[in-house]
Amino acid sequence: MKKAILILLLWVSFPLAVQAGSADAQQAMRLFQKHHYHDAALLMYAQLSHRTIEEPYDIQRNFGMICLANARFYNRLHQAAKPLQVEYLKRMVQADDQRKSAASRLARLYLGKALLADGRFTPAIAALTQFLEISGVDEIDRYEARVDLGAAHHAAGQKIRATKIWSALPVDEPHVAALLAAAYQQSGLHPEKILPLAQGAAKTLLTANKPIPVQCASALLDIYGRRNMVREGFEIIAHTQLATFAREEVIGDHKVLRFYDAGLFRHLSAFYSQAAINAFNTAKKSANTRTSVTATFLAGEAYAFSRRMDEASRAMDELLAAAPPNALSRLAQVRQLAYGLNTHSPKTTRLDLDGLLSEKSSVDQLSDIVLLCAQLGVDCPDALKRATLLWQQAQGRPPANLGMALGHYYRARQDHGRTLHYLEAARDKSRKNRIEANPPAMLADLAWAYYKNRQYSEALEIYFTMSKQFPAVRQIQVALQGIYSMEQQSAGDAKIF
Amino acid sequence: MKRLPNFVCLTIIVVAGLLLAQPAAAIRSDGNPDGGVLNYGEYGRPVTLDPITSNDMISLRVSELVFSGLTAINEKQEVVPDLAERAEISDDGRLYTFYLRKDVTWHPREGETPVPFTADDVIFTYNIMMHPKTITPLKVRNEFIESVEKIDDFTVRFTLKRPILNALAKFSFKIIPQHGPENKEFLTREDPFVHHPIGTGPYMVRNITADREVILVANDNYYKGRPHIDKFVARPFADQNIMGQALMFNAIDMIVLVNHRDIPQIQGDKRFVLQPYNALSYSFFGFNIRNPLLVDKRVRQAFTYAVNRQEMLDAFFQGQGTIISGPFAPGSWAYNLDIQPTPYDPQKAVALLKEAGFERGPGGIMARDGQKLSLTLKVPIAKESEAIKRVVLAFKNYLSKIGIEIQGEFIEWLAWKEDIFLHHDFDLMFASWVFDDSADISSLFHSAEIGAWKNNFGAYSNPEVDSLIVESKLTLDHEKRRTINRKLHAIIADESPYVFLWTLTNYAAYNKKVRHVGIHPYKFFSYADEWYIPKTEQR
């Protein structure tokens, strides 16, 4: 996908000087090109929010690109954070049970939340039920547990039970209202209550003159993303410290635990994805062909990312009907085919995608197809074989885009050894962890591969640098530090280097 | 009694092996060829080659090839058996009984019959290591042991003062032979053993050449089987640029630490593998707090405010690193993410000096009670020397702007170590620490570690830090230990016994002819017995 965006960037050639946008819009694009997606999104949104009209459309398209990059990146983080949180909290609970002293009261609540976010409903119900049996915990934590317990029951098919649990919650409490609204949203229950609850909570939280609690922000983003309420969502992001923990627990003099919102990355990703779709659909209206066709292509990409494959296919049909230039046309043809395929039938998909290859398939084309396969979760053995061969036969350093494509492909297949091999080779080692030199999504997958290979310090180093631009990464850092501290087996040595 | 699964597995293998042959060494069955020489570039000469008296990485790498411990850490970071084939731990976590391998012999000295490794060697190592006159950073690491006793020739039992986390990993300290050192009571750097040691590991020290190259040859009797590569040669380079060129021109096969400027070139050359390892290191300027001018923490803090670390990192290391805020590396589980690095703020630096009673005196130098803030800085000539020279120059310039005068002195590695660790003859020093992943800073900052050849060279002392360090070691609760380490980070960052600088990217580079290369993130050569060079590529 990265390559496709680069081609687009080249084609539209970014005539920054002639863009109708302000200096801020140009600065936002510079930040985007440096992979500072978070700052770029906030800056560009601030620019757009001052406008009363949709134009200029190229700025809308650029905003969409920034949002899509955020969506993809947060999705990568979500894929890492989910299992990490579960692993970390499980170990914490196990250790507490064994030690039987200085145990956390909140660990089971957050384990339940993490399990729920990971789609493991039965163990989530068990953890949350156990938490509710603990005496003396704060009421607000009990309410949260009940919201999640209801959600877990509902997801496990016990709808009446869920409704019963939720019905006893105090919705005048904004914290509870926000979480409950998100639970209703996910369950499809009480559609009429969702927006009043969410907006009431948001109003109270936004006027409270302090940062919005991160779990409330996460819930509201979930709602606003699904309801296409981009402006409201950005207002929440602007008033939330994404690095902040959801709860802190102090046990005795020397034990402080911090718990984080397990759904944050998923909700950020979904929200940004919807914001991207909106922006591209607006930009498609441009009379400028370059702007409209690139926006159409990117709308297809954004739909595909959101797994809205019919709309993604339609976008490619629309684009090809507009006779775009060759480079874009080739990319669109591949996607038209890929999006139109039944991705639940990998065999068919595999054959058709491989059929797009020719003897003269270039590194760029191969990289694009392998990446597409990674994104769609399908096999493409011929493309993979050729890409691997090309990578091995490269003179000097193998092409970085090919290495990245292969790395992401193997990441999607949980082959962590190969992921590490290809992404490490593709990494610009002269600026190892810099997101300016290495795409954040690539670094996120590399960090994950290092974690799975038990090279914790390498993974932590990547997240450390990443967190400077993406503060929400803190929750991954804390969980990984926790696992590392339990896993490390060293003697306690220090030497002069 | 609890028994560890890894150890159990190996017991079965060992018993079977003993029935077949004793004491002949095992034969490797991986099918890879023996032979060849591996020349590796080091950035300095080792001071000593034994595992007890050394406190630098150059020595550690050699001793990793020469010695073995009761336990070891494998590539998956699991504790595995080494000289002990199994261990039993009492239910209260205080008794550790090790059953030793019976097929291990010490490297023979010339004309000597190989001597078997026994429980006496384990007892001897512990006793000599803990002797008050032995100078070693290992003492603080092993103070959790109350006593050791010999059960029989191949069984030893350690009694711990209290149960601790990761105790088994701590028994990876290297065992030295009872018949090794001349002085059987304590070990000093004058003992011939530390310069020409014998061990039980895969390689034996043959000799040290006039050029200070350390020649190591394969131990045919290594209990895991003879290592594949015949010979390892550690070649010291005073200048990392020359070391990089030596790799490019095939004069050496491996570099343990690649010069940052060489990274793009090596990454683009298909002959070489550029392998990252170990992020747990950082560089710093350390204060000698014995100097009355440096006792006030505001003075030390002023140094950090006065120095633009990011500018130095970008200019001299191509930005390949991260500014740190305290005594742990960012890749460590103990790093306190809430503590931000001190910003560059020379005005704040001046204000702090004034608060501490300093005023600009003649020549613009800050002075208090007639004593000028004019200090010596001692820097070893080793490792990335060009970049370090620039760092030192920049450091001097930054400080001169706020009225601190620095006289920098570049000193040969061994002399530098004596000045810093033995004589404590310095005001400021430049160095880097590297840690294994236990994040144990006790030897650096605990007041009991002040003294000759000890790691708390600057005499930093804070009872609260001492108490937190001890509590961190005592606890069996990982989360409590994390919290304590975060507190330590915050306190030490505030008290600034060092100007904490940065952690740099570490890469090894090696010629692709060397195969099956696994690099331990800290000890480097832990798996070197499995490396090999195909016959066609052996020189």
Image (cartoon, helix red, strand yellow):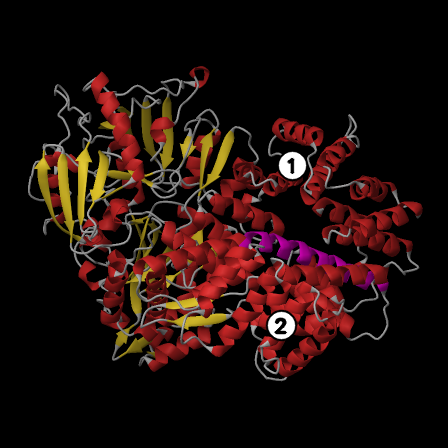
| Mark 2: secondary structure | helix
* Amino acid type for the residue under numbered disc 2: Leu
Q: Are marks 1 and 2 in contact (CB under 8 Å)?
A: no
- Residue A240 lies left or right of residue A282; in this view the side is left
Q: Main secondary structure of the magenta part?
A: helix
Closest to the observer, B511 or B185:
B185
Mark positioned earlier in the residue sequence (1 or 2): 2
Label 1 sits on a secondary structure element that is loop
Rendered position, B119 above or below B136: above
Residue under the image location 21 percent in, 58 percent down: B425
Q: Is residue B85 above or below residue A277?
A: above
> How much space separates mark 1 and mark 2, taking CA atoms?
49 Å
Residues flagged by tags 1 and 2 on a common chain: yes
Could you tell me residue B394's position as x and y percent?
43, 60
Q: Give the amino acid type for the residue marked by disc 1 in the picture.
A: Pro
Q: Which residue is mark 1?
A: A399
Mark identifier at residue A180? 2
**Image spot of residue A292 (x, y percent):** 88, 56
Could you tell me which chain the residue with mark 2 belongs to?
A: A
Task: Using the image as rendered, state which of residue A340 and residue A27 is in the foreground.
Answer: A340
Which residues are drawn in magenta? A57-82
The chain holding disc 1 is A
